[in-house]
Amino acid sequence: DAKTTQPTSMDCAEGRAANLPCNHSTISGNEYVYWYRQIHSQGPQYIIHGLKNNETNEMASLIITEDRKSSTLILPHATLRDTAVYYCIVRVNEAGGTSYGKLTFGQGTILTVHP
Amino acid sequence: DTEVTQTPKHLVMGMTNKKSLKCEQHMGHRAMYWYKQKAKKPPELMFVYSYEKLSINESVPSRFSPECPNSSLLNLHLHALQPEDSALYLCASSQVLGTQPQHFGDGTRLSIL
């Protein structure tokens, strides 16, 4: 799986949009971008994933650049409960490869939402 | 509330004890996973089961023994653990292997004395 690079930490004011960047410059054509987050004392929670088109769900939006070398997770109106570690993960979704079925977490970004 | 239930939430055991961690899901998922997470580190994959058969073992020491007795249940049997095995053990499931997002439980926090 392609390696990802994320900032170690970010701050965001409550009610404002949180924009979390992720660099994945070595991504392959068959690799998807996934975002998970882990709130303190809980297991990781799936947020969103995409291949090349921008995606939106009830939790967040995912913007992937045209060359697919980077992406941004957007939390449109951050709340205190969004304080967590956010993981950007690139993974293959096709059977047969040695990494098939695996989810490899990097260090993630610690997002702190303050009042 | 998580749809993947792990018990117990906390476990303290000695190095000579035998204990088991339990994970249960009723979402009809056919892939289940064990992860280990040390303090302030990301989760690391240990084992993957697909349709009740072991699919991936990430070179985990034999003192950790996984078992998948049915499609809803996943166990992790522990024997002769070392202090460095103290960690949060997370279980996850997905509809099938590799295609759908994984749903995680909140983990069992294990301390080895």
Image: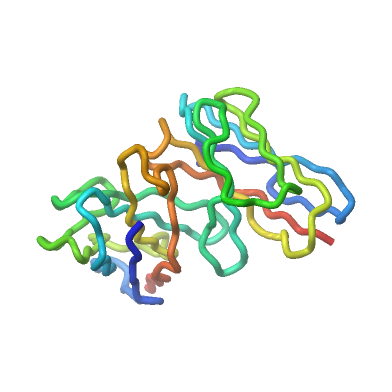
On the question of residue A53 being in view, the answer is: yes
Residue B25: quarter of image: top right
A103 vs A81: above or below: above
* Residue projecting furthest to the left: A66
- Residue at position x 74%, y 40% in the image: B77
* Quadrant in the picture for residue B70: top right
The answer to whether B79 appears left or right of A109 in the picture is right
Left or right: A89 as drawn, with respect to A30: right
| The C terminus of chain B sits in image quarter | bottom right
B8 left or right, relative to A91: right
Numbered marks: total: 0
Position of B90 relative to A22 (above/below): above
The residue that appears at 89% across and 51% down in the rendered structure is B16
Q: Position of residue A35 (x, y in %)?
A: 34, 55
Residue A56 screen position, x and y as percent: 20, 49
On the rendered structure, is B95 left or right of A62? Answer: right
Going 39% across and 39% down the picture, which residue do you hit? B98
Q: x%, y% of residue A101?
A: 42, 42
Q: Residue at x 23, y 56 (%)?
A: A28
- Colouring method of the image: rainbow
Using the rendered view, name the quadrant where residue A6 is placed.
bottom left
> Who is closer to the viewer here, B13 or B64?
B64
- Is A43 placed above or below A15 here? above
Q: Is residue B34 visible?
A: no
Q: Position of residue B52 (x, y in %)?
A: 56, 27
